[in-house]
Image (cartoon, coloured by chain):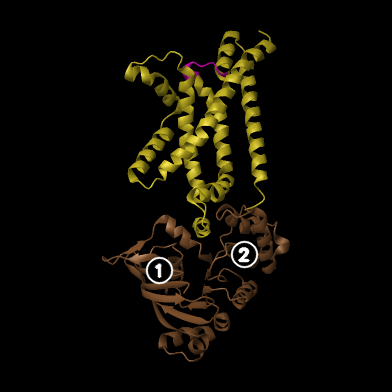
Chain colours: A yellow, B brown
Amino acid sequence: MTFSTMLATMGEGMLRTCLIFFLTLLFSLPLGMVVMFLRRSRFTLVREITKIYIAIMRGTPLMLQLLMWYFGPYYLFGMSIRGYRFPAIIIGFAVNYSAYFAEIYRGGIESIPRGQYEAAEILGYSKAQTFFKIILPQVIKVILPSVTNEIITLVKDTSLAFTLAYNEMFSLAKQIAASQTSFTPFIIAGVFYFVANYAVAFVMERIEKALDYYH
Amino acid sequence: MILQMNSIQKSFGGLEVLKDISFHVDEGEVVSIIGPSGSGKSTLLRCATFLEKIDAGEIRYMDKAAVTTNEAGRAEYVSHSELAKVKNYFGLVFQNFNLFPHYSVLKNVMDAPVSVQKRPKEEVRQEAMELLRKMDLENRADAYPCQLSGGQQQRVAIARALALKPNILFFDEPTSALDPELTGEVLKVIRQLADEKMTMVVVTHEMPFARAVSSRVIFMDKGVIVEQGDPESLFGDTQEERTRQFLRNYQR
């Protein structure tokens, strides 16, 4: 197998990897917001349940969670799981990452001084206006470095989709490496992750710079 | 009468911070509230502006009841929408400014009139620039709060409060977070507002200022009003021993 065929085969996997990456972000970033609100609910029961949820998401391996999401419906309810592979991966990733994002958001929200809420209240802003106009923009600035960390971890975590026999890039790399007894696929994979994360860091740094006009 | 507070009681946990306080503010009056730390003066202001809820008592703005006390002796606030209307009557300037750091000076002043009061942007912009001119900050309109000195920030905060055209403006120790040399520029602005007959309540530790600018001075200690009167009689002809003791500490 020539280098270019290897690259072409793995290229298809890279597209799948990117798909997992973007869909996970698309769902987990807003979902994390919802989890954060539940975690900060004024109802103790809601708060406690959300805490347990976050503890499970952070306290068990993502690999195990993916297996649960995929095989759970069959073993628990006897449901057919044909064609469910990809949705299971996205659900597993999004639900897991939302727990981490929720905690990052919470840290950001709690770092905003009370005075900002009080000033907004005195000036007559509604609760929604206060959150979206005053609090959220400041929170975004505070949490950017932690979010960057999480996104970089996600780039690498996409390889866990191999657990459900989904042919993302790293699964293909392993298959080719075994069949061709070559180390090259791993090098290509390494370069791919590195370049992807370099791009992530670059973009996030630009966003941080854009928000640098105040502190 | 712009503000009337009757028999206000407020406790935090078991600690009684306000014990049956009554006072009122007439139009055009400048009332200074002085007293030692922990005397309840800031809490009184926070209760008047609904940042804290009172336990019992009555609060009226422009002769409209905002809080009443029921037969069981507990404070009852009017509905959320009614309270929102009452909130239009007052503004508050905080000790540590609480400007919005992500907004420019101009936007800090303009945003509430535009997005809360829904007034036309152009009209608000002109008024905001006029206010900034008055605060001697017209050339800093595009700056961000972090680029300003404390004194400048506090003057922006005053402009921001005035932009909503309140009937009464509260100041919670407006110069306590400032260097002595920046205190003067903020006091000058407040004095200017007093000359224009703006109704104000100022919690302050600046005794010469309170004496020079106020129409009435209230001395508070341990959650009660110990003494009040026009500044000349309160400072010059002090009646209560506790007040004398407090003022003596300031003359040293």
The image shows residue B172, relative to residue A37, as above or below, that is below
The amino acid beneath tag 2 is Ala
Q: Is B86 positioned to the left or the right of A148 in the image?
A: left
Q: Which mark is residue B159?
A: 2
Q: Is A28 positioned to the left or the right of A74 in the image?
A: right
Q: Residue at x 42, y 74 (%)?
A: B39
* Quarter in which the C terminus of chain B is drawn: bottom right
| Residue denoted by label 1 | B59
Count of numbered labels shown in the rendering: 2
Q: Earlier in the sequence, mark 2 or mark 1?
A: 1
Residue stretch rendered in magenta on the structure: A162-168
Q: Which mark is residue A190?
A: none
Counting from the top left corner in percent of width and height, residue A4 is at 69, 12
The amino acid beneath tag 1 is Ile
Q: Secondary structure at mark 1?
A: strand
Query: Does the segment drawn in magenta span residue A164?
Result: yes
Query: Does the segment drawn in magenta span residue B181?
Result: no
Counting from the top left corner in percent of width and height, residue B91 is at 53, 65
Q: Residue at x 48, y 50 (%)?
A: A127
Measured Cα–Cα span from mark 2 to mark 1: 26 Å
Viewer-nearest of discs 2 and 1: 1
Circle 1: is it few (<14), some (14-19), or many (20+) Cα within 10 Å?
many
Counting from the top left corner in percent of width and height, residue A109 is at 50, 48
Q: Chain of mark 1?
A: B
Q: Secondary structure at mark 2?
A: helix
